[in-house]
Image: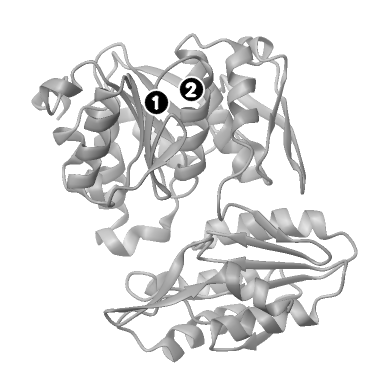
């Protein structure tokens, strides 16, 4: 019960007392939303420390600190000692389920979306949702919860967010029907290889922004994340010039529709869930024109098991050629993982499906078979380095594999 939760959460350390922390959670889109918000805060004149799957950053510069609880404290403490007054933190459901929102004070919460892609890690849909909810039930009175008006999970979160926390709603039509009135919504999203432009639905917040937004990332999912970031910024009284400047200063993120070659276009993307794969494939399909969409992808070992057929189906419905390959099998049989993904991909779908176990060879095959007007989309790893087999990390990079394919 809400009245049993002690609010607000005290600062974890005396040095953290003046730090205002924004937590970003959801199934997909956390990283880009986190970096969008950090860029806007920097453009507004704030000293900002940011933590995401890409690492730790202070005022936009990466900090070489290990990704751990100890590293988190070290990064934020160091940034505060250098003048940081804002923190933007990507928060996973695993961390929230372990009580993270009771250990570290989050002043504001931003919710991207909730799909069933990670349910297996939590045992049930209810536990997954409850883990995400921990970020919001601990917010202090007068703070802000930014919620997705096109997502059913947000409607459930709205019911447990304390009534003295302000709600701001945003959304884009690619997520599905709008489920409630929206404070900042997209009327139209136009993507190109250079970025994405967003035409806004009429609203007081949209009017402040001049009715449009432009971002350097490609795809409707990033438009959705940009709306979340802009909605939060407007809730904090940040003016439109700083918001537009922040987006302009954050033109791309490694491994997020990351164009690494042209003629043919080769794109790396971190997408590794059915929802994310469907969305990045839809974006690529919209850009490829008369060419073919060739997708190289796989699934990781561990908790990915139940979603593997759905991952295959998401790609199989959208690609012209789908090449299923290896991706961090960990302690599982890589051939069994590939077989499960390929089975979903081979449903009566659009794609011609091939299996090439060696990931570098799969990428080389896709690149060498692609014509100038085709698009090769390599998903699941972005710019991460190393493949995990058992307890051993083998040196490997999709970027290098693409480069080698053109030699």
The residue indicated by pointer 2 is 42
Give the camera-side residue of 226 and 51: 51
User: Where residue 121 sits in the image (x, y, percent)?
Assistant: 29, 62
- Residue neighbourhood size for the residue with mark 1, other residues' Cα within 10 Å, grouped as few (<14), some (14–19), many (≥20): many
Secondary structure at numbered mark 2: helix
Image quadrant holding the N terminus, namely top left
- Residue neighbourhood size for the residue with mark 2, other residues' Cα within 10 Å, grouped as few (<14), some (14–19), many (≥20): many
Q: Is residue 51 visible?
A: yes
Q: Are marks 2 and 1 in contact (CB under 8 Å)?
A: yes
- Above or below residue 147? Residue 173 is below
Image quadrant holding the C terminus, namely bottom right
The residue indicated by pointer 1 is 48
Q: Which mark is residue 320?
A: none
Name the side, left or right, on which 66 lies relative to 54.
Answer: left
Coloration mode: one colour
- Above or below residue 296? Residue 155 is above
Give the camera-side residue of 129 and 28: 28
User: Where residue 200 sits in the image (x, y, percent)?
Assistant: 70, 24
Which residue is found at the position 43% from the left and 17% from the top?
A: 46
Distance from the alpha carbon under mark 2 to that under mark 1: 6 Å
Name the side, left or right, on which 260 lies relative to 61.
Answer: right
Which residue is found at the position 52% from the left and 61% from the top?
A: 383
Q: Quadrant of residue 255?
A: bottom right
Secondary structure at numbered mark 1: strand
Looking at marks 2 and 1 on the same chain, the residue that comes earlier in the sequence is marked by 2
Q: Quadrant of residue 333?
A: bottom left
């Amino acid at each position: 019960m809400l009245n049993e939760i002690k609010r607000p959460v005290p600062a974890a350390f005396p040095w953290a007392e003046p730090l205002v922390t924004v937590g970003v959670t959801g199934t997909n889109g956390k990283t880009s939303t986190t970096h969008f918000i950090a860029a806007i805060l920097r453009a507004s004149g704030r000293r900002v420390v940011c933590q995401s799957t890409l690492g730790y950053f202070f005022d936009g510069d990466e900090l070489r600190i290990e990704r751990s609880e100890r590293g988190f404290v070290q990064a934020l403490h160091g940034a505060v000692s250098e003048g940081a007054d804002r923190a933007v933190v990507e928060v996973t459901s695993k961390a929230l389920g372990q009580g993270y929102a009771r250990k570290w004070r989050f002043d504001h919460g931003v919710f991207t979306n909730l799909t069933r892609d990670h349910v297996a890690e939590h045992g049930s849909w209810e536990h997954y949702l409850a883990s995400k909810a921990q970020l919001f039930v601990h917010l202090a009175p007068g703070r802000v919860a930014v919620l997705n008006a096109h997502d059913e999970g947000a409607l459930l979160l709205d019911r447990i967010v304390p009534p003295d926390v302000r709600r701001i709603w945003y959304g884009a039509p690619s997520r599905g029907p709008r489920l409630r009135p929206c404070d900042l919504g997209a009327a139209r999203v136009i993507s190109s290889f250079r970025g994405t432009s967003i035409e806004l639905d009429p609203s007081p917040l949209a009017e402040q922004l001049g009715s449009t937004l432009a971002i350097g990332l490609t795809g409707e999912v990033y438009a959705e994340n940009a709306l979340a970031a802009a909605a939060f910024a407007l809730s904090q009284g940040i003016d439109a010039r700083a918001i537009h400047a922040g987006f302009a200063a954050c033109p791309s993120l490694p491994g997020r529709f990351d164009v690494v070659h042209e003629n043919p276009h080769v794109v790396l993307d971190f997408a590794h869930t059915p929802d994310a794969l469907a969305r990045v494939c839809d974006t690529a399909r919209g850009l490829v024109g008369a060419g073919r969409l060739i997708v190289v992808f796989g699934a990781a070992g561990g908790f990915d098991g139940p979603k593997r057929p759905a991952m295959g189906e998401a790609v199989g419905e959208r690609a012209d050629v789908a090449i299923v390959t290896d991706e961090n099998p960990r302690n599982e049989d890589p051939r069994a993982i590939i077989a499960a993904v390929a089975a979903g991909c081979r449903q009566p779908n659009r794609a011609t499906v091939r299996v090439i176990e060696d990931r570098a060879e799969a990428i080389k095959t896709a690149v060498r078979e692609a014509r100038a007007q085709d698009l090769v989309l390599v998903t699941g790893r972005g710019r991460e380095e190393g493949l995990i087999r058992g307890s051993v990390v083998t040196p490997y990079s999709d970027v290098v594999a693409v480069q080698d394919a053109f030699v």
